[in-house]
Amino acid sequence: MNRNKKTEFGRRLKSLMLERGWNQSELARYAEMGRDNVSGYINGKYLPNAKHLHKLARALGVDPQTLLPDTEALPLPPQDEEYLEIRNIPGRHGQVALRVSKLLDPDTALKVMRVIHEARH
């Protein structure tokens, strides 16, 4: 893999991590991966596989392409990894981040999307 791509990925990852006031251990915990992985990514040693890229992006609240822009569409991690996360975001008083990964029937998914859309306005 291109060394420059690894270095740039590490810079983006570190910048987003620091914007949130996190250290490497916190990012590893939020992304549910080992600290050694996070350290290797930040130090430009290697690029993450699709699963780790999605976990890092999810933890940071960004799209995977924000971390690795020149990457073609990556497969999503397996859908058997359901989760619900609600957390405070520094600097966003009165708001929380909500992340959900859940298999739903189409009608229920549309209801959820309507609630989210209405909350924006």
Image (spheres, helix red, strand yellow):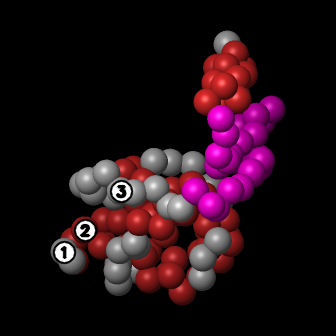
Q: CA distance from mark 2 to mark 1?
A: 5 Å
Give coordinates of residue 58: x percent, y percent. Answer: 57, 54
From this view, report whether residue 57 is shown above or below residue 14: above
Give coordinates of residue 62: x percent, y percent. Answer: 50, 48
**Boundaries of the magenta span:** 79-105
Q: Is residue 113 visible?
A: no
Q: Is residue 85 left or right of residue 20?
A: right
- For label 3, the residue is 74
From this view, report whether residue 14 is shown above or below residue 46: above
- For label 1, the residue is 2
> Quick one: which residue is furthest to the bottom in this view?
36
Please report the residue visible at 36 percent of the width from the left and 51 percent of the height from the top: 65
What amino acid type is highlighted by mark number 1? Asn
SS at mark 1 in the image: loop
> Quick one: which residue is furthest to the right in this view?
94
Give coordinates of residue 97: x percent, y percent. Answer: 70, 42
What amino acid type is highlighted by mark number 2? Lys
Asked if the residue under mark 1 is in contact with the one under mark 2, i.e. CB atoms within 8 Å, the reply is: yes
Name the quadrant of the C terminus.
Answer: top right
Q: Residues within 10 Å of mark 3 (few under 14, many from 20)?
A: few
- For label 2, the residue is 5
Please report the residue visible at 68 percent of the width from the left and 56 percent of the height from the top: 82
Q: Nearer the viewer, residue 114 or 20?
A: 114
Please report the residue visible at 64 percent of the width from the left and 71 percent of the height from the top: 32
From this view, report whether residue 81 is shown above or below residue 66: below
Q: Is residue 86 left or right of residue 58?
A: right
Magenta-colored stretch includes residue 99: yes
Q: CA distance from mark 3 to mark 2?
A: 16 Å
Q: Is residue 4 visible?
A: yes
